[in-house]
Image: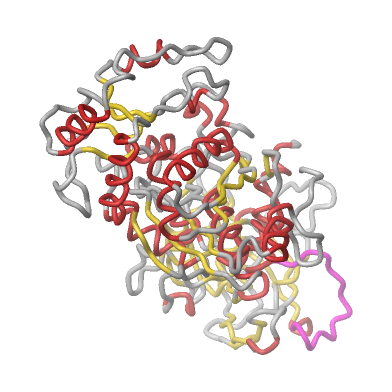
Amino acid sequence: MSTEKTSGPNDSLNFLEEIVEDDLRTGRVEHILTRFPPEPNGYLHIGHAKSIVVNFGLAQKYGGKTNLRFDDTNPSTEEQEYVDGILNDIRWLGYNPANVFFASDYFDQIYEWAKHLVGEGKAYVDFSTPEEIAVLKGTPTEPGKDSPYRNTSPEENLDLLERMRTGEFPDGHCVLRAKVDMTSPNMLLRDPIMYRIKHAHHHRTGDKWCIYPMYDWAHGQSDSIEGITHSICTLEFAPHRALYDWFIEQLSIYPSHQYEFSRFNLTYTVMSKRKLLQLVREGHVNGWDDPRMPTLAGMRRRGFLPESLREFATRIGVTKRENLIELSLLEFHIREGLNKIALRRFAVLDPLKVVIENYPEGQMEWLETENNPEDPETGKRALPFTRELFIEQDDFMENPPPKYFRLFPGGMVRLKSAFIIRCDRVEKDADGKPNTVYCSYVPESRSGQDTSGLKVQGVIHWLSAEHAKQAEVRLYDRLFQLENPGVEDDFKKSLNPTSLQVISHAMVEPALMEVTSGEKFQFTRLGYFCVDPDSTPGNPVFNRTVTLKDAWAKAQKK
Protein backbone atom coordinates (compact mmCIF):
# COMPACT_ATOMS: atom_id res chain seq x y z
CA MET A 1 0.00 0.00 0.00
CA SER A 2 0.99 3.62 -0.44
CA THR A 3 3.26 5.22 2.18
CA GLU A 4 1.74 8.66 1.65
CA LYS A 5 -0.44 10.32 4.26
CA THR A 6 -3.76 8.62 4.78
CA SER A 7 -6.80 9.52 6.78
CA GLY A 8 -7.69 7.58 9.86
CA PRO A 9 -8.99 8.09 13.38
CA ASN A 10 -5.58 8.99 14.83
CA ASP A 11 -3.56 9.79 11.72
CA SER A 12 -2.19 13.13 10.63
CA LEU A 13 -4.15 15.16 8.12
CA ASN A 14 -4.29 13.98 4.54
CA PHE A 15 -3.55 16.49 1.80
CA LEU A 16 -7.22 17.36 1.20
CA GLU A 17 -7.75 18.09 4.88
CA GLU A 18 -4.64 20.28 4.83
CA ILE A 19 -6.08 22.25 1.89
CA VAL A 20 -9.44 22.69 3.59
CA GLU A 21 -7.91 23.81 6.87
CA ASP A 22 -5.68 26.30 5.05
CA ASP A 23 -8.66 27.65 3.06
CA LEU A 24 -10.68 28.12 6.23
CA ARG A 25 -7.76 29.70 8.10
CA THR A 26 -6.94 32.17 5.32
CA GLY A 27 -10.57 33.01 4.67
CA ARG A 28 -10.60 31.81 1.06
CA VAL A 29 -13.86 30.11 2.00
CA GLU A 30 -16.21 30.58 4.94
CA HIS A 31 -17.77 27.13 4.74
CA ILE A 32 -17.18 23.82 2.97
CA LEU A 33 -19.48 22.60 0.20
CA THR A 34 -18.48 19.49 -1.74
CA ARG A 35 -20.41 17.44 -4.27
CA PHE A 36 -20.67 13.89 -5.54
CA PRO A 37 -21.53 13.96 -9.28
CA PRO A 38 -22.27 10.46 -10.68
CA GLU A 39 -23.55 9.88 -14.18
CA PRO A 40 -26.83 7.91 -13.97
CA ASN A 41 -25.76 5.31 -16.53
CA GLY A 42 -25.15 2.43 -14.14
CA TYR A 43 -24.98 1.48 -10.48
CA LEU A 44 -22.40 2.72 -8.00
CA HIS A 45 -19.52 0.40 -7.12
CA ILE A 46 -16.90 0.16 -4.37
CA GLY A 47 -14.73 2.77 -6.12
CA HIS A 48 -17.58 5.26 -5.90
CA ALA A 49 -17.92 4.40 -2.21
CA LYS A 50 -14.46 5.82 -1.59
CA SER A 51 -15.36 9.04 -3.41
CA ILE A 52 -18.60 9.29 -1.43
CA VAL A 53 -16.75 8.80 1.86
CA VAL A 54 -14.11 11.38 0.86
CA ASN A 55 -16.62 14.04 -0.22
CA PHE A 56 -19.22 13.57 2.51
CA GLY A 57 -16.64 12.81 5.18
CA LEU A 58 -14.56 15.90 4.43
CA ALA A 59 -17.59 18.17 4.55
CA GLN A 60 -18.86 16.59 7.77
CA LYS A 61 -15.49 16.92 9.49
CA TYR A 62 -15.41 20.66 8.87
CA GLY A 63 -19.08 21.42 9.45
CA GLY A 64 -19.95 21.67 5.77
CA LYS A 65 -22.38 20.01 3.39
CA THR A 66 -22.35 17.84 0.29
CA ASN A 67 -24.62 17.97 -2.75
CA LEU A 68 -25.54 15.01 -4.89
CA ARG A 69 -25.60 16.11 -8.52
CA PHE A 70 -26.45 13.72 -11.34
CA ASP A 71 -24.33 14.40 -14.41
CA ASP A 72 -27.20 13.64 -16.79
CA THR A 73 -25.73 15.03 -20.02
CA ASN A 74 -25.90 11.86 -22.13
CA PRO A 75 -29.57 10.87 -22.51
CA SER A 76 -28.94 7.76 -24.59
CA THR A 77 -27.28 5.92 -21.68
CA GLU A 78 -29.12 7.33 -18.66
CA GLU A 79 -32.22 5.98 -16.94
CA GLN A 80 -34.38 6.83 -13.96
CA GLU A 81 -33.63 3.35 -12.61
CA TYR A 82 -30.01 4.38 -12.12
CA VAL A 83 -30.99 7.69 -10.52
CA ASP A 84 -33.13 5.86 -7.95
CA GLY A 85 -30.47 3.21 -7.39
CA ILE A 86 -27.68 5.74 -6.81
CA LEU A 87 -29.69 7.75 -4.30
CA ASN A 88 -30.64 4.55 -2.48
CA ASP A 89 -26.99 3.42 -2.37
CA ILE A 90 -25.76 6.73 -0.94
CA ARG A 91 -28.37 6.68 1.81
CA TRP A 92 -27.64 3.03 2.57
CA LEU A 93 -23.97 3.94 2.92
CA GLY A 94 -25.00 6.33 5.64
CA TYR A 95 -25.11 9.76 3.99
CA ASN A 96 -27.87 12.23 3.20
CA PRO A 97 -27.10 14.88 0.55
CA ALA A 98 -27.79 18.49 1.48
CA ASN A 99 -29.42 18.85 -1.95
CA VAL A 100 -30.15 16.60 -4.91
CA PHE A 101 -29.49 18.37 -8.21
CA PHE A 102 -29.13 17.44 -11.87
CA ALA A 103 -26.84 18.96 -14.47
CA SER A 104 -30.01 19.25 -16.57
CA ASP A 105 -31.31 21.74 -13.98
CA TYR A 106 -28.73 24.12 -15.41
CA PHE A 107 -29.11 23.48 -19.14
CA ASP A 108 -30.72 26.87 -19.77
CA GLN A 109 -28.05 28.78 -17.86
CA ILE A 110 -25.22 26.80 -19.43
CA TYR A 111 -26.63 27.51 -22.88
CA GLU A 112 -26.78 31.23 -22.12
CA TRP A 113 -23.14 31.10 -21.05
CA ALA A 114 -22.28 29.33 -24.29
CA LYS A 115 -23.92 32.14 -26.25
CA HIS A 116 -21.87 34.61 -24.22
CA LEU A 117 -18.61 32.90 -25.17
CA VAL A 118 -19.67 32.70 -28.81
CA GLY A 119 -20.57 36.39 -28.76
CA GLU A 120 -17.09 37.21 -27.44
CA GLY A 121 -15.43 35.16 -30.16
CA LYS A 122 -14.32 32.47 -27.69
CA ALA A 123 -16.38 29.62 -29.14
CA TYR A 124 -17.38 28.56 -32.64
CA VAL A 125 -19.47 26.02 -34.52
CA ASP A 126 -17.34 23.44 -36.32
CA PHE A 127 -18.67 21.30 -39.20
CA SER A 128 -15.53 19.15 -39.39
CA THR A 129 -15.96 15.41 -39.01
CA PRO A 130 -14.71 13.74 -35.81
CA GLU A 131 -11.84 12.28 -37.83
CA GLU A 132 -10.87 15.70 -39.20
CA ILE A 133 -11.00 17.24 -35.73
CA ALA A 134 -8.77 14.49 -34.36
CA VAL A 135 -6.17 15.04 -37.10
CA LEU A 136 -6.18 18.81 -36.65
CA LYS A 137 -5.65 18.44 -32.91
CA GLY A 138 -2.16 17.12 -33.54
CA THR A 139 -0.33 14.88 -31.09
CA PRO A 140 1.15 15.33 -27.62
CA THR A 141 4.47 16.18 -29.27
CA GLU A 142 3.12 18.19 -32.23
CA PRO A 143 0.92 21.30 -32.05
CA GLY A 144 -2.55 21.25 -33.53
CA LYS A 145 -3.80 23.23 -36.50
CA ASP A 146 -6.71 25.64 -36.65
CA SER A 147 -10.03 24.37 -37.89
CA PRO A 148 -11.20 26.07 -41.11
CA TYR A 149 -14.26 27.18 -39.11
CA ARG A 150 -12.28 28.72 -36.24
CA ASN A 151 -12.52 32.29 -37.52
CA THR A 152 -16.20 32.35 -38.37
CA SER A 153 -17.71 35.60 -37.10
CA PRO A 154 -19.46 35.68 -33.73
CA GLU A 155 -22.69 36.77 -35.41
CA GLU A 156 -22.72 33.79 -37.76
CA ASN A 157 -21.74 31.41 -34.93
CA LEU A 158 -24.61 32.67 -32.78
CA ASP A 159 -27.01 31.93 -35.62
CA LEU A 160 -25.52 28.47 -36.17
CA LEU A 161 -25.65 27.67 -32.45
CA GLU A 162 -29.33 28.59 -32.30
CA ARG A 163 -30.01 26.43 -35.35
CA MET A 164 -28.22 23.56 -33.61
CA ARG A 165 -30.44 24.06 -30.57
CA THR A 166 -33.69 24.13 -32.56
CA GLY A 167 -32.89 20.83 -34.26
CA GLU A 168 -32.10 22.01 -37.76
CA PHE A 169 -29.04 19.76 -38.02
CA PRO A 170 -28.86 15.96 -37.68
CA ASP A 171 -26.77 14.11 -35.11
CA GLY A 172 -23.04 14.58 -35.64
CA HIS A 173 -23.47 17.31 -38.26
CA CYS A 174 -21.53 19.89 -36.25
CA VAL A 175 -20.30 20.72 -32.75
CA LEU A 176 -19.64 23.81 -30.68
CA ARG A 177 -15.98 24.20 -29.72
CA ALA A 178 -14.27 26.55 -27.29
CA LYS A 179 -11.53 28.67 -28.82
CA VAL A 180 -8.65 28.09 -26.40
CA ASP A 181 -5.17 27.15 -27.67
CA MET A 182 -4.41 24.73 -30.51
CA THR A 183 -0.72 24.71 -29.55
CA SER A 184 -1.17 23.88 -25.87
CA PRO A 185 0.81 20.88 -24.60
CA ASN A 186 -2.42 19.92 -22.80
CA MET A 187 -4.44 18.25 -25.52
CA LEU A 188 -7.69 19.04 -23.68
CA LEU A 189 -7.12 22.75 -24.26
CA ARG A 190 -6.93 22.37 -28.03
CA ASP A 191 -10.38 23.80 -28.73
CA PRO A 192 -12.45 21.29 -26.78
CA ILE A 193 -15.99 20.39 -27.78
CA MET A 194 -18.66 22.07 -25.66
CA TYR A 195 -21.87 20.80 -27.32
CA ARG A 196 -22.74 17.90 -29.57
CA ILE A 197 -26.03 17.19 -31.33
CA LYS A 198 -27.99 14.23 -30.00
CA HIS A 199 -31.66 13.85 -30.86
CA ALA A 200 -32.51 11.65 -27.89
CA HIS A 201 -35.25 11.72 -25.29
CA HIS A 202 -33.94 12.86 -21.92
CA HIS A 203 -35.28 11.18 -18.78
CA ARG A 204 -36.01 14.60 -17.22
CA THR A 205 -36.15 17.28 -19.91
CA GLY A 206 -37.92 15.12 -22.48
CA ASP A 207 -37.39 16.45 -26.01
CA LYS A 208 -36.69 20.06 -25.07
CA TRP A 209 -33.02 19.75 -26.03
CA CYS A 210 -31.27 18.12 -28.94
CA ILE A 211 -27.83 19.50 -28.04
CA TYR A 212 -26.16 18.33 -24.86
CA PRO A 213 -23.11 19.75 -23.08
CA MET A 214 -19.91 17.76 -22.79
CA TYR A 215 -18.62 16.90 -19.32
CA ASP A 216 -15.94 19.62 -19.32
CA TRP A 217 -18.45 22.29 -20.28
CA ALA A 218 -21.20 21.29 -17.86
CA HIS A 219 -19.18 20.24 -14.84
CA GLY A 220 -17.30 23.32 -13.74
CA GLN A 221 -20.23 25.57 -14.48
CA SER A 222 -22.56 23.38 -12.42
CA ASP A 223 -20.04 23.52 -9.56
CA SER A 224 -19.99 27.31 -9.85
CA ILE A 225 -23.78 27.63 -9.87
CA GLU A 226 -23.99 25.59 -6.66
CA GLY A 227 -21.07 27.41 -5.04
CA ILE A 228 -18.99 24.27 -4.59
CA THR A 229 -15.87 25.21 -2.64
CA HIS A 230 -13.90 22.01 -3.20
CA SER A 231 -14.62 20.01 -6.34
CA ILE A 232 -12.93 16.72 -5.52
CA CYS A 233 -12.41 14.11 -8.22
CA THR A 234 -10.02 11.32 -9.11
CA LEU A 235 -6.60 11.71 -10.69
CA GLU A 236 -7.64 10.98 -14.27
CA PHE A 237 -9.34 14.39 -14.24
CA ALA A 238 -6.16 16.27 -13.35
CA PRO A 239 -5.53 17.30 -17.01
CA HIS A 240 -9.09 18.68 -17.10
CA ARG A 241 -8.39 21.19 -14.33
CA ALA A 242 -6.85 23.79 -16.66
CA LEU A 243 -9.99 23.78 -18.82
CA TYR A 244 -12.20 23.82 -15.71
CA ASP A 245 -10.41 27.01 -14.61
CA TRP A 246 -10.41 28.52 -18.12
CA PHE A 247 -14.18 28.36 -18.50
CA ILE A 248 -14.78 29.84 -15.04
CA GLU A 249 -12.31 32.65 -15.70
CA GLN A 250 -13.81 33.53 -19.10
CA LEU A 251 -17.31 33.69 -17.61
CA SER A 252 -16.23 35.54 -14.43
CA ILE A 253 -18.41 33.27 -12.28
CA TYR A 254 -17.96 31.81 -8.80
CA PRO A 255 -14.43 30.33 -8.72
CA SER A 256 -14.92 26.73 -7.70
CA HIS A 257 -11.64 24.82 -7.45
CA GLN A 258 -10.88 21.26 -8.51
CA TYR A 259 -8.67 18.89 -6.51
CA GLU A 260 -7.70 15.33 -7.37
CA PHE A 261 -6.98 12.23 -5.30
CA SER A 262 -6.08 8.73 -6.40
CA ARG A 263 -8.71 6.15 -7.13
CA PHE A 264 -7.94 2.56 -6.25
CA ASN A 265 -8.27 -0.84 -7.85
CA LEU A 266 -9.33 -3.93 -5.95
CA THR A 267 -7.76 -7.33 -6.58
CA TYR A 268 -9.88 -9.97 -8.34
CA THR A 269 -12.28 -7.21 -9.37
CA VAL A 270 -13.10 -4.95 -12.32
CA MET A 271 -14.64 -1.55 -11.66
CA SER A 272 -15.08 -0.22 -15.18
CA LYS A 273 -18.77 0.60 -15.75
CA ARG A 274 -18.39 -0.55 -19.33
CA LYS A 275 -17.05 -3.93 -18.26
CA LEU A 276 -19.61 -4.33 -15.51
CA LEU A 277 -22.39 -3.55 -17.97
CA GLN A 278 -20.92 -6.19 -20.30
CA LEU A 279 -21.04 -8.78 -17.51
CA VAL A 280 -24.70 -7.95 -16.89
CA ARG A 281 -25.82 -7.88 -20.52
CA GLU A 282 -24.01 -11.09 -21.45
CA GLY A 283 -25.45 -12.96 -18.48
CA HIS A 284 -22.19 -13.69 -16.66
CA VAL A 285 -23.90 -12.35 -13.55
CA ASN A 286 -27.54 -12.07 -12.52
CA GLY A 287 -27.94 -8.31 -12.75
CA TRP A 288 -26.33 -5.24 -11.21
CA ASP A 289 -27.14 -6.48 -7.70
CA ASP A 290 -25.59 -9.91 -8.16
CA PRO A 291 -23.68 -10.50 -4.89
CA ARG A 292 -20.50 -11.17 -6.88
CA MET A 293 -20.56 -7.69 -8.38
CA PRO A 294 -18.50 -4.86 -6.83
CA THR A 295 -21.59 -2.63 -6.98
CA LEU A 296 -22.99 -1.27 -3.72
CA ALA A 297 -26.29 -2.94 -4.64
CA GLY A 298 -24.49 -6.28 -5.00
CA MET A 299 -22.55 -5.83 -1.78
CA ARG A 300 -25.73 -4.89 0.09
CA ARG A 301 -27.45 -8.03 -1.21
CA ARG A 302 -24.42 -10.10 -0.24
CA GLY A 303 -24.68 -8.84 3.32
CA PHE A 304 -21.89 -6.26 3.56
CA LEU A 305 -22.30 -3.66 6.29
CA PRO A 306 -22.22 0.00 5.24
CA GLU A 307 -20.15 0.91 8.30
CA SER A 308 -17.57 -1.69 7.26
CA LEU A 309 -17.35 -0.16 3.78
CA ARG A 310 -16.88 3.29 5.30
CA GLU A 311 -14.13 1.96 7.56
CA PHE A 312 -12.45 0.26 4.58
CA ALA A 313 -12.57 3.45 2.51
CA THR A 314 -11.03 5.38 5.40
CA ARG A 315 -8.38 2.74 5.98
CA ILE A 316 -7.02 2.79 2.42
CA GLY A 317 -6.60 6.54 2.75
CA VAL A 318 -6.48 9.62 0.55
CA THR A 319 -3.34 9.81 -1.58
CA LYS A 320 -2.13 11.02 -4.96
CA ARG A 321 -0.86 7.63 -6.04
CA GLU A 322 -3.09 4.93 -7.48
CA ASN A 323 -2.73 1.54 -5.89
CA LEU A 324 -4.02 -2.00 -5.99
CA ILE A 325 -5.79 -2.89 -2.75
CA GLU A 326 -6.09 -6.47 -1.58
CA LEU A 327 -9.65 -7.77 -1.58
CA SER A 328 -8.73 -9.57 1.64
CA LEU A 329 -8.49 -6.17 3.37
CA LEU A 330 -12.09 -5.42 2.46
CA GLU A 331 -13.14 -8.89 3.62
CA PHE A 332 -11.30 -8.32 6.90
CA HIS A 333 -13.38 -5.22 7.62
CA ILE A 334 -16.58 -7.07 6.69
CA ARG A 335 -15.73 -9.91 9.10
CA GLU A 336 -14.84 -7.48 11.87
CA GLY A 337 -18.21 -5.77 11.57
CA LEU A 338 -20.31 -8.91 11.23
CA ASN A 339 -18.57 -10.68 14.09
CA LYS A 340 -19.97 -8.07 16.47
CA ILE A 341 -23.59 -8.20 15.35
CA ALA A 342 -24.34 -11.49 13.59
CA LEU A 343 -26.38 -14.03 15.57
CA ARG A 344 -24.89 -17.53 15.52
CA ARG A 345 -26.92 -20.32 13.99
CA PHE A 346 -26.27 -23.96 13.05
CA ALA A 347 -26.49 -25.06 9.42
CA VAL A 348 -25.28 -28.20 7.67
CA LEU A 349 -24.59 -27.69 3.98
CA ASP A 350 -23.67 -31.28 3.03
CA PRO A 351 -25.52 -33.51 5.51
CA LEU A 352 -24.21 -36.85 6.79
CA LYS A 353 -26.52 -38.75 9.12
CA VAL A 354 -25.28 -39.71 12.57
CA VAL A 355 -27.18 -42.25 14.70
CA ILE A 356 -26.34 -42.26 18.40
CA GLU A 357 -27.14 -45.87 19.21
CA ASN A 358 -27.03 -45.57 23.01
CA TYR A 359 -29.33 -42.52 23.07
CA PRO A 360 -32.93 -43.55 23.82
CA GLU A 361 -35.25 -43.70 20.84
CA GLY A 362 -37.97 -41.06 20.95
CA GLN A 363 -36.11 -38.96 23.52
CA MET A 364 -35.45 -35.27 22.92
CA GLU A 365 -33.78 -32.69 25.13
CA TRP A 366 -33.03 -28.98 24.77
CA LEU A 367 -29.44 -27.79 24.86
CA GLU A 368 -28.51 -24.15 25.22
CA THR A 369 -25.95 -22.33 23.08
CA GLU A 370 -24.95 -18.68 22.81
CA ASN A 371 -26.52 -16.42 20.19
CA ASN A 372 -23.37 -14.28 19.95
CA PRO A 373 -20.44 -14.66 22.36
CA GLU A 374 -19.30 -11.14 21.35
CA ASP A 375 -22.54 -9.69 22.73
CA PRO A 376 -23.77 -11.34 25.95
CA GLU A 377 -26.99 -9.31 25.78
CA THR A 378 -28.14 -11.49 22.87
CA GLY A 379 -28.55 -14.32 25.34
CA LYS A 380 -28.85 -17.98 24.52
CA ARG A 381 -31.16 -20.19 22.53
CA ALA A 382 -32.17 -23.84 22.90
CA LEU A 383 -31.53 -26.49 20.25
CA PRO A 384 -33.30 -29.87 20.17
CA PHE A 385 -31.01 -32.90 20.60
CA THR A 386 -32.19 -36.32 19.44
CA ARG A 387 -30.90 -39.77 18.57
CA GLU A 388 -30.45 -38.97 14.86
CA LEU A 389 -28.39 -35.98 13.83
CA PHE A 390 -26.86 -34.36 10.76
CA ILE A 391 -23.21 -33.33 10.61
CA GLU A 392 -21.13 -32.05 7.69
CA GLN A 393 -19.70 -34.67 5.35
CA ASP A 394 -16.37 -32.87 5.73
CA ASP A 395 -16.45 -33.49 9.47
CA PHE A 396 -16.06 -37.25 8.99
CA MET A 397 -13.20 -39.10 7.33
CA GLU A 398 -12.82 -42.87 7.18
CA ASN A 399 -9.04 -42.78 6.75
CA PRO A 400 -7.90 -39.49 8.23
CA PRO A 401 -4.45 -37.93 7.88
CA PRO A 402 -2.36 -37.08 10.95
CA LYS A 403 -3.69 -34.26 13.16
CA TYR A 404 -7.25 -34.73 11.93
CA PHE A 405 -9.35 -33.71 14.92
CA ARG A 406 -12.83 -34.38 13.63
CA LEU A 407 -14.80 -37.64 13.50
CA PHE A 408 -13.32 -40.91 12.26
CA PRO A 409 -13.80 -44.63 13.10
CA GLY A 410 -12.79 -45.16 16.70
CA GLY A 411 -12.27 -41.42 17.20
CA MET A 412 -14.06 -39.04 19.53
CA VAL A 413 -15.28 -35.50 18.98
CA ARG A 414 -17.42 -33.01 20.85
CA LEU A 415 -20.72 -31.89 19.39
CA LYS A 416 -20.77 -28.14 20.01
CA SER A 417 -22.85 -27.23 23.10
CA ALA A 418 -23.79 -30.90 23.45
CA PHE A 419 -21.97 -34.18 24.14
CA ILE A 420 -18.84 -36.10 23.26
CA ILE A 421 -19.49 -38.89 20.76
CA ARG A 422 -17.37 -41.80 19.48
CA CYS A 423 -17.65 -43.26 15.98
CA ASP A 424 -18.28 -47.01 16.29
CA ARG A 425 -19.08 -48.04 12.71
CA VAL A 426 -19.89 -46.65 9.26
CA GLU A 427 -22.51 -47.59 6.70
CA LYS A 428 -21.82 -46.85 3.03
CA ASP A 429 -23.93 -46.53 -0.09
CA ALA A 430 -23.48 -48.50 -3.31
CA ASP A 431 -20.71 -46.16 -4.42
CA GLY A 432 -18.74 -46.64 -1.23
CA LYS A 433 -19.57 -43.21 0.16
CA PRO A 434 -20.43 -43.02 3.87
CA ASN A 435 -24.14 -42.31 4.33
CA THR A 436 -24.66 -43.13 8.00
CA VAL A 437 -22.23 -42.98 10.92
CA TYR A 438 -23.16 -44.96 14.01
CA CYS A 439 -21.87 -43.52 17.24
CA SER A 440 -22.21 -43.71 20.99
CA TYR A 441 -22.35 -40.70 23.28
CA VAL A 442 -21.00 -40.04 26.75
CA PRO A 443 -23.95 -38.92 28.92
CA GLU A 444 -21.64 -37.32 31.52
CA SER A 445 -19.99 -35.07 28.89
CA ARG A 446 -22.78 -32.53 28.45
CA SER A 447 -21.33 -29.08 27.72
CA GLY A 448 -21.21 -26.92 30.81
CA GLN A 449 -21.82 -29.95 33.04
CA ASP A 450 -19.04 -32.29 31.88
CA THR A 451 -17.90 -34.74 34.54
CA SER A 452 -16.53 -37.37 32.15
CA GLY A 453 -12.89 -36.38 32.48
CA LEU A 454 -12.46 -36.94 28.73
CA LYS A 455 -10.41 -34.53 26.65
CA VAL A 456 -11.06 -34.22 22.92
CA GLN A 457 -9.58 -31.70 20.50
CA GLY A 458 -12.26 -31.59 17.84
CA VAL A 459 -15.55 -29.68 18.06
CA ILE A 460 -18.14 -29.92 15.29
CA HIS A 461 -21.63 -28.52 14.80
CA TRP A 462 -24.77 -30.58 14.24
CA LEU A 463 -28.53 -30.53 13.79
CA SER A 464 -31.31 -32.78 15.00
CA ALA A 465 -32.40 -34.68 11.89
CA GLU A 466 -35.99 -34.65 13.08
CA HIS A 467 -36.12 -30.88 13.53
CA ALA A 468 -33.79 -29.60 10.78
CA LYS A 469 -35.36 -27.58 7.98
CA GLN A 470 -34.39 -27.35 4.34
CA ALA A 471 -33.03 -24.12 2.84
CA GLU A 472 -31.16 -22.90 -0.23
CA VAL A 473 -27.64 -21.63 0.34
CA ARG A 474 -25.63 -19.74 -2.26
CA LEU A 475 -21.89 -19.83 -1.81
CA TYR A 476 -20.33 -16.77 -3.45
CA ASP A 477 -16.65 -16.44 -4.14
CA ARG A 478 -14.39 -14.12 -6.13
CA LEU A 479 -15.72 -13.39 -9.58
CA PHE A 480 -12.28 -13.50 -11.21
CA GLN A 481 -9.32 -15.85 -10.84
CA LEU A 482 -6.67 -13.28 -11.77
CA GLU A 483 -5.48 -10.77 -9.20
CA ASN A 484 -5.78 -7.89 -11.67
CA PRO A 485 -8.27 -8.95 -14.38
CA GLY A 486 -8.78 -5.37 -15.58
CA VAL A 487 -5.42 -5.36 -17.42
CA GLU A 488 -6.42 -8.26 -19.66
CA ASP A 489 -7.64 -7.56 -23.20
CA ASP A 490 -10.43 -10.08 -22.68
CA PHE A 491 -11.05 -9.79 -18.96
CA LYS A 492 -13.82 -12.39 -19.14
CA LYS A 493 -11.28 -15.15 -19.76
CA SER A 494 -10.37 -15.00 -16.09
CA LEU A 495 -13.92 -15.41 -14.78
CA ASN A 496 -14.03 -17.88 -11.90
CA PRO A 497 -16.28 -20.83 -12.93
CA THR A 498 -16.97 -21.62 -9.27
CA SER A 499 -17.79 -18.08 -8.15
CA LEU A 500 -21.31 -19.30 -7.34
CA GLN A 501 -22.32 -22.68 -5.97
CA VAL A 502 -25.98 -23.26 -5.17
CA ILE A 503 -26.83 -25.78 -2.46
CA SER A 504 -30.53 -26.42 -2.75
CA HIS A 505 -30.86 -28.96 0.07
CA ALA A 506 -28.92 -27.48 2.94
CA MET A 507 -30.28 -28.12 6.42
CA VAL A 508 -30.70 -25.36 9.00
CA GLU A 509 -32.05 -25.02 12.52
CA PRO A 510 -35.78 -24.24 12.81
CA ALA A 511 -35.23 -20.63 13.93
CA LEU A 512 -33.95 -19.83 10.43
CA MET A 513 -37.35 -20.46 8.92
CA GLU A 514 -38.65 -17.14 10.23
CA VAL A 515 -36.23 -14.59 8.81
CA THR A 516 -36.52 -11.41 6.78
CA SER A 517 -34.55 -10.21 3.78
CA GLY A 518 -31.24 -8.66 4.76
CA GLU A 519 -30.88 -10.36 8.15
CA LYS A 520 -27.33 -11.45 8.87
CA PHE A 521 -26.06 -14.55 10.64
CA GLN A 522 -22.91 -16.47 11.33
CA PHE A 523 -23.39 -20.11 10.44
CA THR A 524 -21.15 -21.71 13.05
CA ARG A 525 -17.83 -22.82 11.54
CA LEU A 526 -19.05 -22.02 8.01
CA GLY A 527 -19.04 -18.25 7.54
CA TYR A 528 -21.29 -15.20 7.54
CA PHE A 529 -24.56 -15.35 5.64
CA CYS A 530 -27.33 -12.95 4.67
CA VAL A 531 -30.99 -13.60 3.85
CA ASP A 532 -31.54 -13.02 0.13
CA PRO A 533 -34.59 -11.14 -1.25
CA ASP A 534 -35.48 -14.30 -3.22
CA SER A 535 -36.59 -15.86 0.07
CA THR A 536 -40.27 -16.68 0.55
CA PRO A 537 -42.13 -17.77 3.72
CA GLY A 538 -40.88 -21.22 4.65
CA ASN A 539 -38.29 -21.20 1.85
CA PRO A 540 -35.33 -19.09 2.95
CA VAL A 541 -32.36 -18.38 0.71
CA PHE A 542 -29.01 -17.50 2.28
CA ASN A 543 -26.07 -15.81 0.58
CA ARG A 544 -22.59 -16.39 1.92
CA THR A 545 -21.20 -12.94 2.64
CA VAL A 546 -17.69 -14.00 3.55
CA THR A 547 -15.93 -17.02 5.01
CA LEU A 548 -14.75 -17.02 8.62
CA LYS A 549 -11.15 -16.86 7.46
CA ASP A 550 -9.37 -15.96 4.23
CA ALA A 551 -10.00 -19.32 2.60
CA TRP A 552 -8.94 -18.03 -0.84
CA ALA A 553 -5.40 -17.17 0.25
CA LYS A 554 -5.08 -20.58 1.88
CA ALA A 555 -6.28 -22.33 -1.30
CA GLN A 556 -3.75 -20.46 -3.47
CA LYS A 557 -0.86 -21.75 -1.32
CA LYS A 558 -1.73 -25.40 -1.96
Classify the position of the C terminus by image quarter.
top right
Split into 4 quadrants, where in the image is the N terminus? top right
Q: Is residue 522 visible?
A: no
**In this image, 59 relative to 505: left or right?**
right
The residue positioned 68% from the left and 49% from the top of the image is 328
Residue located at (28% from left, 16% from top): 128
On the picture, is 512 further left or further right than 71?
Answer: right
Q: Residue at 68% of width from left, 44% of height from top?
A: 325
Residue range (magenta): 446-461
Work out whether 399 lies above or below 194: below
Q: Position of residue 395 (x, y in %)?
A: 67, 57
Q: Main secondary structure of the magenta part?
A: loop
In this rendered view, identify the residue nearer to me: 258 or 396. 258
Residue 471 magenta-drawn?
no
Q: From this viewpoint, which residue is outermost toward the left?
A: 168
In the rendered view, tell whether residue 312 sits above or below residue 443: above
Specify the color scheme. secondary structure
The picture places residue 171, in percent across and down from the top left corner, at 19, 28
* Residue 160 on image: x %, y %: 19, 29
| 59 sits left or right of 124 in the view | right
State the image quarter where residue 102 is shown: bottom left
Which of 412/5 is in front? 5
Q: Quadrant of residue 531?
A: bottom left
Q: Is 290 rendered above or below residue 506?
A: above
The answer to if 450 sits in the magenta stretch is yes
Who's the residue at 41% across and 75% down the image? Answer: 516
Query: Where residue 129 sits in the image (x, y, percent)?
Result: 28, 16
